[in-house]
Amino acid sequence: MSFDLVFFGGTGDLTWRKLMPALFQAWRHGKLPAHGRILAVARDDRDDAGYRAWLKDRLQEAESAKRPSEEEFARFSELIHYLRMDLSQPTDYQRLKEWLAARNADTVVIYLATSPHLFPSICEQLGACGLNHDRVRVVLEKPLGHDLASAQEINRVVRSVFSEQQALRIDHYLGKPSVQNLMALRFGNVLFEPLWRRESIANIQITLAESIGVGTRGDFYDRTGALRDMIQNHALQLLTMIAMEPPSSANADAIRDEKLKVLRSLKPFDAISVARDVVRGQYRAGNVEGHAAVGYIEENKVPPGSHTETFVALRCEIQNWRWAGVPFYLRTGKRLAQRQAEIVVNFKATPHPIFPGPNAANKLVIKLQPEDGLELQLLAAKGTSSGAEHEALSPVSLDLDFDKAFPTNRVGAYERMLLDALAGRLNLFVRSDEQEQAWRWVEPILEAWSAQPNGLRPYAAGTWGPPAASALVARDGFAWAEEEC
Ligand code: BG6
């Protein structure tokens, strides 16, 4: 299969920090199909050699195991080309069309790594010059819109040019190997399915914690906030994977239909439940992993007095037979105590305790990052009791580290998504109805917040967020994983 992969936003952060390194790894591991060309499109005046030299420097910033050697970069960069384009100029799209026509590749993937407000006009221009034929696919980076209406408008324009099969909405969390393993765990094994329901599960917690602050993205982040940046997409996508019914096949639409049903079953928020069940916070100066960190409003490009949230914790419920009454807690934040993404499934305690000591419960921890693994916490007898008829049980873990179990050539999230986009595998891309339903669900939270702009709770950088987040879970008699004794 021959391919052309085009990056709009070819000099942007996403391209050099994530996309090009991922492509380089795919090439290094021999996973990139042969006969391909990669085209970076941007406004600057450069030629192929100039872009390659610029990219070479950028790729040196990767961690050492992922940095190309001189010889590797020389070979990899033969695939890479550059085209200067002004995205508002129809004639520049004609030049792109001519560049692509010179090869007439079997597959053309056009990745829009630009600001999303440009998506509609780019798609219209691509359509106008005939770059929407059935060998073309377009990849749309998040955030897709900033509310339901803007997402619907982007989707309306995209749909007028491309079919649903051609428009791939990316959520890179779905490409993480651990998220793939979540599907495997649930639907490739018989063990957990009978327990995966309200009768056995007390609550489920999804934590996407970051220790970094907003870095150089202060202006983008301030317009966005944690709810739009992480909850509307990454956290809700993980929730659908945890809560969905078994799909009838691994076919993309069979999976996406089930995910959509979960989103539709989420109990809607109103102003009262937002005030009760959603906590928003903003970091103040503190100390993160041994380093002093400034507060959010002192960050570069953040306006003084900003009310943007850098932390959200919320409690939600899924209204169906499987999950009725089971609280799901979602939490994300910047400048938290550590980088940690995990899903914790807390099982109920045994109905009739026969051992002395607290009647603790089983717990399954699905670790997304930094480790990629599974930990099943069980209770066991140490066998060291002296004289007592029954000793109290002790918690013990079955621990699985996927990087050790499968040590070679595991594919990272963006690498996986790019390879899937080239191959036309749609399972891991978000369908427009899922994405719109997620906006529909978060919108009452946004509305309630704009009516009450002063509800932000401060937290010190390097902590786990405002105390109200702990109170949210404690109210139901539970605790976040790191608070359990
Ligand atoms: C992005 C958000 O989608 O995900 C960023 O815009 C966030 O703010 C990033 O830092 C986190 O991704 P990961 O893969 O590093 O957890």
Image (cartoon, rainbow, N blue to C red):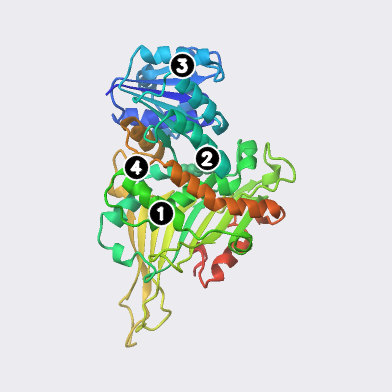
- Quarter occupied by residue 411: top left
Q: Are marks 2 and 1 in contact (CB under 8 Å)?
A: no
Answer above or below: position of 209 versus 379. Answer: above
Position of the N terminus by quadrant = top left
Label annotation for residue 271 = none
From the image, state whether disc 4 or disc 1 is nearer to you. 1
Label 4: which residue?
427
From the image, state whether disc 4 or disc 2 is nearer to you. 2
Q: Which of disc 2 and disc 4 is earlier in sequence?
A: 2
> Which residue type carries mark 2?
Gln
Residue at 71%, 52% in the rendered image = 453
Q: Mark 4 and mark 1: span between their CA atoms?
A: 16 Å
Q: Nearer the viewer, residue 72 or 258?
A: 258
Q: Which of disc 1 and disc 3 is earlier in sequence?
A: 3
Label annotation for residue 152 = 2
Answer above or below: position of 335 versus 429. Answer: below
Label annotation for residue 261 = 1
